[in-house]
Image (cartoon, helix red, strand yellow):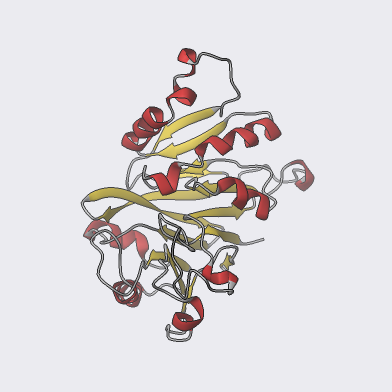
Amino acid sequence: MPLELIFLGTGTSAGVPMIGCDCTVCTSEDPRDHRDRPSVLIRYPDLSRPAGADDDEQPLRQLLIDTSPELRQQAIRQRLHRLDGVFFTHAHADHIFGLDDLRRFNAVMHAPLDIHAEATVLDSLSKTFRYIFDSQHNVNDSFIAQLIGHPVVVGEALSRFGATWIPLRLMHGRLPIVGYRVDHGGASLAYCTDVSSIPPESYPLLQNLDVLVLDALRYRHHPTHMTVDRALQEIEQLKPGRAFLTHIAHDIQHADLSQKLPENVELAYDGLVVRCGV
């Protein structure tokens, strides 16, 4: 089985449909216009297992990027029963507020869960979810997530179950955040959400990709996100095999934009499965 990416959520911080909005997209009956807050699942065989190991002993490795507020619904929709780790891009609410739902994976797997993020993001998580990371002060001995934090450093690769993960620097307005490049068995993908610009040092890490996922919020300028035109310019420069646009606002109707995109570029939608290297 190849390296696989599943879009769990492709919307903005407000989601689509938005509360109190009766626009064409928010009232659309096209399920591709219904967008949860952004998150993706990366799935692949464990190439680090010893030769001859029983394939039934360990399912495909499944690693999550960001825990959106809809994580519970996303996991149920995808029949997601286990995780082998979580990576975070940054600590904004639409990317972390589903973290509490990780406790169900602890209960199902009977094990703690590794989470990976820059040190500043791990610090933000510990302050936002103090009842998880500083549980000795809780009044009750409550059911909380069991998480093991691992700091990532931009540009420093780490190996996870036979795949190489490389955190790369992106800018979200003035806020430095990270995207991730994943290489596995000759296939490669990069996930770059909430990005308004790519620093020069990150371009080499975005070369020779089978799949590139890039932020494309809307048609009009936004100070902390790429527009559709800007994302297409970056894709033309980077020349991935295929590209997918995500973090999409209600300004964009799926059926309308999809027919206008270049041949190798697609508009992502919730539940879309992309296989790399096939």
40 sits left or right of 77 in the view? left
Q: Compared to 193, does 54 lie above or below? A: above
The residue sitting at 64% across, 35% down in the picture is: 104
Q: Residue at x 51, y 13 (%)?
A: 139
Whether residue 9 sits left or right of residue 76 in the image: it is: left
Examine the image and state in which quarter residue 57 appears: top right
Q: Where is residue 42 drawn, in percent x and y?
A: 56, 54
- In the image, taking residue 246 as reference, residue 168 lies left or right, namely left
Badge count: 0
Q: Residue at x 42, y 49 (%)?
A: 94
Camera sees residue 47:
no
Tell me the quarter of the picture where residue 261 sits: bottom left
Query: Can residue 115 be seen in the rendering of this structure?
Result: yes
Quarter of the N terminus within the rendering: bottom right
User: Is 230 drawn above or below residue 94 in the view shown?
Assistant: below
Q: Quadrant of the C terminus?
A: bottom right
Q: Position of residue 53 (x, y in %)?
A: 74, 43
Q: Nearer the viewer, residue 114 or 206?
A: 114
> How far from the left and from the top, in percent, is residue 146?
56, 27
Is residue 131 shown left or right of residue 205?
A: right
Residue 109: horizontal and vertical position, in percent?
Answer: 68, 34
User: Can you tell which quarter of the image residue 245 is in?
Assistant: bottom left
Residue closer to the observer: 162 or 198: 198
